[in-house]
Amino acid sequence: MGEYDPLGEDDEGQEEGEEDPEAGRPLPDDERESVEADLEDLDAMRTVFEPQGAKGVVIACTECGANHYYGWELLRASLEHMIDTGEPRVHEPAYQPKEDDYVVWDYGKGYVDALADTGLEAGSRVEVTSCGWCETPVEPHFSFCPKCGRPMAVLRLFKELLDRGMDERDVRAVLLRAGFEPFS
């Protein structure tokens, strides 16, 4: 089975520079719903993969056999353009993209679907804004403190357990028994 192209780009039979006779027509309801679903999927993938350094998605084109690389904003704008005009937006291909910087569309879609199936929301990461040991400010996607190198996961776990109603003293005791260093 070929890779899915959410832009549905198909320019068969159209010469370069020739106007598309269907340009500007609204999308049929089923196609509009499909593009809107693609926008939702794109947002979910971006929420999950952008903090990990992904620059966008790669889609294997069934027409030309090449991979097409789309930055998050470029693909969003193209999909919104399709909703507004009924046609895909013309774009320049990415210049020498690094494959590892992009998520394969089908993989990303499957990943966020699996998160949803397990009851996890794509954007439900517990935010930590500073290190609990050295108080260095950290970005929400940091796994370790850039100054002291300690893991942010334990702070996220601490916060999540407090948010679920556990007593702070009990949470600290559990984390210490599990082998985590005490933090302020």
Image: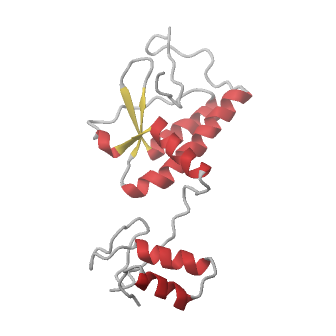
Q: Position of residue 33 (x, y in %)?
A: 68, 34
In front of the other: 100 or 9: 100
| Image point (63%, 34%), residue name | 83
Relative to 36, say whether 149 is above or below: below
Scheme by which the image is coloured: secondary structure
User: In the picture, residue 34 is in which quadrant?
Assistant: top right
In front of the other: 107 or 38: 107
- Which residue, as the protein is rendered here, is positioned at the far front? 177
In front of the other: 122 or 140: 122
Relative to 146, say whether 133 is above or below: below
- Total marks shown come to 0
| Image point (48%, 54%), residue name | 48
| Image point (41%, 90%), residue name | 184
Q: Position of residue 173 (x, y in %)?
A: 47, 88
| Image point (38%, 47%), residue name | 55
> In this image, 23 relative to 109: left or right?
right
Residue 174 seen anywhere in this rendered image of the structure: yes
In front of the other: 148 or 72: 148
User: In the picture, residue 131 is in which quadrant?
Assistant: bottom left
- Which residue, as the protein is rendered here, is positioned at the far right? 29
Q: Position of residue 19 (x, y in %)?
A: 54, 16
Q: Position of residue 70 (x, y in %)?
A: 42, 38
Residue 128 seen anywhere in this rendered image of the structure: no
